[in-house]
C-alpha cells in the first residue's frame, strides 16, 4: 500500500483521524446498512427483511485508541478494515458479523498523547466525581450511547474487544482482562478466541474500574475483554509482525472463518486485591522499571498511602498495571494470583 506524504499508509492515516469515508462507501455499495453514529465510529450491519435479524449473526464491537498513545492496534485494525471493505465489494459475505468500530480518544491520538484531560478508560461509570468536567467525560457518553444502540437489537452472540498496548514491559507480552460477570458459555468462547490470538495470560476481573469493556459486558451482555498487545509506540513505527497472531484471529472473527488452533492455552489469573490511590502521599514500593506480572512474596510491601500500607496477602501475588500517577480515588494497580 502506498504511503501518504506523512509516511503513513492511507488506511492507517484515515483511521487515526477517524475518517471512515472510503471504507464506509465500500460497505454501503456492497449492500450493508452503514451508519456513523458519532465521530470516530462506524457501524456496519447486514440488511434484513421485515426487521428479522439472524440470531446466529454475531454483533462485534472493536475499539482502539481509547488511550491516544496506544497506536499498534490502530495500525492493525486499519489494515484489516481496509482489506475487508475491499473484499466485500466483490464478495459481500466476506463480512460475517454486524460490526461497530470505535476510535476512542480521537483528540488524544491527534495530539500524540495518552489523554487530553483525564483517562478515558476510567469514565465508563455512573459517578465520575472530579472527572465529570474532563473532555473525556463527554466522549465516554458518546461511546456509551453508540454501544448501547448497537447492541439494542443484537442477537445473543455479542462481542467487544477493546484493543490496547501497555505502558510497562510485561512478563506476558500479551494479556487480557475479562470481567467475571461474562456468561459462562460466552466466556469460554472468548477465552478460546484469546488463545487463538496467542494471548499469554487472562485476568478474571470481579469489579469495574470504569473501563469500556467492563461497561459493555455489564450493561450490554457482551463477551468483552480489554486486550493488551505489547507496548505503546509511535504511530507508523510499530512492528506489525508482533501483532500477526491477533490480526489473523480478528480477521477470522469478522469473516466467520474456522477457528485457528490454539498455540498454548493462556494462563488464567484472578484478582487478589486492587490498589487504590487515596491521597497524594501514595507511593509504590518498586520503581518504574518493574514489569507487569512481577511476582512478590507474602508480606512484601506493595505501596503506602499515608498510614495505609498495602502488602501481599497470599503466598505470592503478581503486580499488574502499577501506576502511581493516576488521580486520587482511582486504581493504581492490581495484584493477581494464578488459578489455571
Image (cartoon, rainbow, N blue to C red):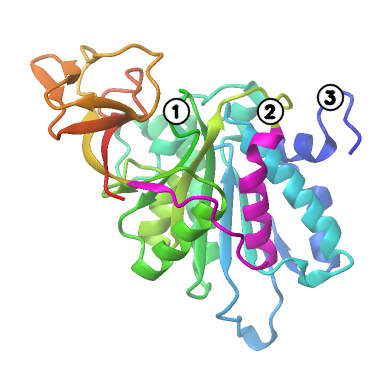
CA separation in Å, label 3 and label 2 = 13 Å
Instruction: Give percent across and percent down for residue 128.
Output: 32, 37
Structural distance between the alpha carbons of marks 1 and 3:
30 Å
Q: What stretch is highlighted in magenta?
A: 240-268
Residue 265, position as x, y percentages in the image: 45, 52
Of tags 3 and 2, which is closer to the observer? 2
Q: Where is residue 281 in the image (x, y as percent from the top left)?
A: 20, 11
Relative to 174, does residue 232 appear above or below in the rendering? Answer: above
To which residue does mark 1 refer?
170
Residue 298 spot, x, y in % from top left? 14, 27
Residue positioned 34% across, 24% down in the render = 322
Q: In this view, does 240 lie above or below 181?
A: above
Q: How many labels were placed on the picture?
A: 3
**Dots 3, 2 in contact, CB < 8 A:** no
Say which element carries label 1: loop
Task: Confirm or deny contact between disc 2 and disc 1 (CB under 8 A).
Answer: no
The residues tagged by marks 2 and 1 sit, at their Cα atoms, a distance apart of 17 Å
Asked whether, in this view, residue 1 is left or right of residue 242, the answer is right
Q: Residues within 10 Å of mark 1 (few under 14, many from 20)?
A: some
Tell me which label, 3 or 2, sits earlier in the chain: 3
Q: Which mark is residue 85?
A: none
Give the left or right position of residue 195, taking residue 247 as reference.
left
Write down the residue under mark 3: 7
Disc 2 vs disc 1: which is toward the camera? 1
User: Residue at 31% across / 47% down in the picture?
Assistant: 205
Amino acid at each position: 500500500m502506498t504511503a501518504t506524504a506523512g509516511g503513513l499508509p492511507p488506511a492507517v492515516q484515515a483511521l487515526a483521524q477517524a475518517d471512515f469515508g472510503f471504507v464506509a462507501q465500500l460497505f454501503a455499495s456492497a449492500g450493508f446498512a452503514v451508519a456513523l453514529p458519532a465521530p470516530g465510529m462506524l457501524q456496519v450491519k447486514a440488511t434484513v427483511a421485515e426487521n428479522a435479524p439472524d440470531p446466529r449473526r454475531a454483533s462485534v464491537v472493536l475499539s482502539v485508541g481509547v488511550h491516544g498513545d496506544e497506536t499498534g492496534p490502530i495500525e492493525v485494525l486499519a489494515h484489516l478494515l481496509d482489506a475487508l471493505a475491499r473484499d466485500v465489494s466483490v464478495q459481500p459475505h466476506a463480512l460475517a458479523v454486524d460490526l461497530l468500530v470505535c476510535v476512542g480518544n480521537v483528540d488524544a491520538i491527534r495530539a500524540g498523547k495518552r489523554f487530553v484531560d483525564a483517562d478515558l478508560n476510567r469514565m465508563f461509570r455512573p459517578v465520575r466525581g472530579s472527572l465529570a468536567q474532563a473532555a473525556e467525560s463527554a466522549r465516554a457518553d458518546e461511546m456509551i450511547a453508540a454501544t448501547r444502540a448497537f447492541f439494542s437489537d443484537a442477537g445473543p452472540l455479542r462481542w467487544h474487544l477493546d484493543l490496547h498496548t501497555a505502558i510497562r514491559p510485561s512478563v506476558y507480552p500479551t494479556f487480557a482482562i475479562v470481567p467475571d460477570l461474562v456468561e459462562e458459555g460466552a466466556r469460554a468462547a472468548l477465552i478460546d478466541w484469546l488463545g487463538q490470538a496467542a494471548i499469554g495470560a487472562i485476568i478474571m476481573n470481579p469489579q469495574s474500574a470504569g473501563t469500556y469493556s467492563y461497561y459493555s459486558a455489564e450493561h450490554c451482555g457482551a463477551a468483552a475483554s480489554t486486550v493488551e498487545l505489547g507496548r505503546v509506540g509511535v504511530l507508523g513505527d510499530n512492528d506489525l509482525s508482533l501483532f500477526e497472531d491477533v490480526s489473523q484471529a480478528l480477521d477470522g472473527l469478522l469473516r466467520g472463518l474456522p477457528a485457528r488452533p490454539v498455540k498454548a492455552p493462556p494462563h488464567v489469573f484472578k484478582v487478589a486485591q486492587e490498589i487504590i490511590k487515596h491521597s497524594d502521599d501514595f507511593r509504590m514500593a518498586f520503581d518504574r522499571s518493574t514489569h507487569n506480572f512481577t511476582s512478590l512474596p507474602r508480606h512484601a510491601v506493595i505501596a503506602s498511602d499515608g498510614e495505609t500500607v498495602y502488602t501481599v496477602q497470599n503466598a505470592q501475588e503478581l503486580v499488574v498495571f502499577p501506576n502511581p500517577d493516576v488521580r486520587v480515588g482511582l486504581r493504581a494497580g492490581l495484584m493477581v494470583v494464578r488459578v489455571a
